[in-house]
Amino acid sequence: MRLTEELILLMLDEDSGYLEMVPSWDFACVMAGAVIADLALEGRIDTDLDALHVISDAPTGDALLDPTLREISEAQEVSSAQYWIERSTVRSEEIVTMTLDRLVEKGILDYETGGFWTLSREVNRSGVYPAGEGETLREAKSRVLNTVLNRDIPDPRDAILVGLMHTCDGFKLILSEEDYDESAEWIETLVRMDLVGRLVHAAVKESAFRPKTRRIVPTKPIPKLGFGDILRQRDFRTGNIPKAMWSIGERHGPVVELPFRMAGQRLVALIGPKTNHWVNRHGRFYLRSKDYIEGLERVFGASRTLPGMDGPEHHKLRKGLRGAYSRAALAERLPQLVGCCREGIGTWREGDVFGAAETFQQYVSSQVSDLLLGVECGDYVDELLEYEHRALVTQVQRAMPKFMLSTPKMRRARKRIAELQDAIHASHTPAQRQGKTKDLADAVLEINGNDPQMLPETDMVFPFVASMVASIYLGSALGFAVYAMVRNPDVYAEIRREADALFGNGDPSSTDFNRNSVDVTHRLFLESERLYPVIPWQLRTVMNQCVVEGFELPTKTRLLICQTASHYSGEIFPDPTRFDVDRYLPGREEHMAPGAYAPYGLGTHTCLGHRWVELQMVVNLMLIAYHVNLEVVPDDYRLGINPFPTSAPNRKLKLRVTEIRNRV
């Protein structure tokens, strides 16, 4: 265990899964100081008040330490520990990333989608973690807190940890105010106990407040696009936002300023796999989501919502809702899902022609309301979807004036929200829900009951509305996937074979839906999401100044994170415009490249239910293929995309039922 690893564990809030730190100069100095201290403990360097000397330049074999050791060894002059700490701050983000990855590999931390880490169940239960070669080490926080609160004499290594924590005010995060005040003098004493720890602490403290040689990272001017640069992209005119943005990124770079403004602020786009990777790793420290969603929150009377929260509160609410959105929750209700699918398919007759976009949005919305909310709102689902669609366009994208949400038609539709909420409450009493699998409405009501400040009654309607908004996305995703299936006859035939094998002898169990039995269907959906992502971008605001790919982003900058632009990278996805389900086979797995594939968003706000979505879409595709044959009409139709408020097949996409293969 390296000091950097234990520092991260000391900074981790196990309840929230959030690292209690913000990348900054002083924190970078602390992480660099931990590396210097580890090199001293390894016997590679020695230091006094004035100079740091190399004892041995033999590599340690540890990628955390060796780059710093090599730089010190190759230096022409002897310099102080403070100098080398400051020089090493440039590696701080790399050190943190590498440390987190190692803690996950060792089974000490569990990584959760969205950029959160928690202590693994085994470490949480045992209070120890592996220290190498079969040895274990008492968990860092309990060791250090015991030293501080019980006045125990620490070993030299823990004295260094105390010094590093003290330097970055870490004890103020993990001790109560009273305990910190009582322990402050003892902490100062502990810092002075070990020579290496004292010198590193002093050097870090001096560096943090009076740097000798702060590295200046040169930044580049952000290219400014004109309206002509946008209009020249034909893909914008056809609605293919990801492809258009990838072309802009290829020509102008990964960070560009667009010729639009949002709330009076300039709009900067991040494009490509490297910026995606940065957002996944570091966005939580620099970006917030509240600004773009607060208008939509106000429409529904809410102020505390999952998409509008950041930091520990976001993770806490996410944890409370995670079970309801999980693949396992949907797998438990597979017969119910199959029944919902067949109810929709059963209305189709041979020779019927229907519009894909509207049909699949209504078709999926009935599934969502039944499976997530436990209510049937088929009589007014069209009005619900229309109101939510208008709210997105006016409040989030601002493509229409806000008064368009107050027309007589919209005011009538707004009343359906209250009807939905009343229906949910009426159907989720203890007696009504006895013996039933917990759904999203149950989870929301439970969070409100357990912690009404986390999710007050005024905010309870938003998760219900959000699930219905999600049905718009899912309906569009299913429309794209069905189009892709029908347009690729060989793949269509393989999906029919998979569907016949699963449903030909009666309905399968959830365990029958494994990766092998739905392989081609699953890969078709992955490829459809690559070519036709329904959420092509995300909006964020810079809350802490940062540098991305050499470009400085000041606070309050509005960001358009074009996370799906990388789907059209020819380096990652050869011949990127070609539909190819084999991209996801073992040996290729092109989507696994860092920052390459992001149809569900990035970072802490990655779609919570993406595994639910994949199962729901696979079941739908297989049942459609099992029960009917479809064709696109007219035969020469070329896919058009309606990009607002989310990407969807345009209304010209129509499908004809050519054959009823197996009656419902």
Image (spheres, rainbow, N blue to C red):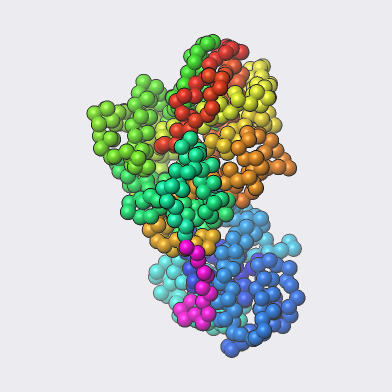
Task: Tell me if I can see residue 317 in this picture.
Answer: no
Residue 77, above or below 8: below
Q: Quadrant of the N terminus?
A: bottom right
Q: Of 353 and 412, which appears nearest the observer?
A: 353
Give me the residue at 24% from left, 28% from top: 408
- The residue lying at 48 percent from left, 43 percent from top is 232
- Locate residue 393: give its quadrant: top left
Percent of width and height locating residue 216: 51, 73
Q: Is residue 664 left or right of residue 375?
A: right
Q: Dividing the picture into quarters, in which one does residue 412 lie? A: top left
Given residues 249 and 383, the one toward you in this image is: 249
Residue in front for this viewpoint, 173 or 73 = 73
Secondary structure mostly seen in the magenta stretch: loop
Q: Position of residue 75 (x, y in %)?
A: 66, 81
| Point 40% across, 26% down: residue | 375
Residue stretch rendered in magenta on the structure: 208-221
Residue 212 belongs to magenta span: yes
Q: Position of residue 65 (x, y in %)?
A: 66, 70
Q: Where is residue 70, by image quadrant? A: bottom right
- In the rendered image, the quadrant that contains the C terminus is top right
Magenta highlight on residue 546: no
Q: Residue at x 66, y 78 (%)?
A: 72
Residue 645, compared with residue 484, is above or below; it is below
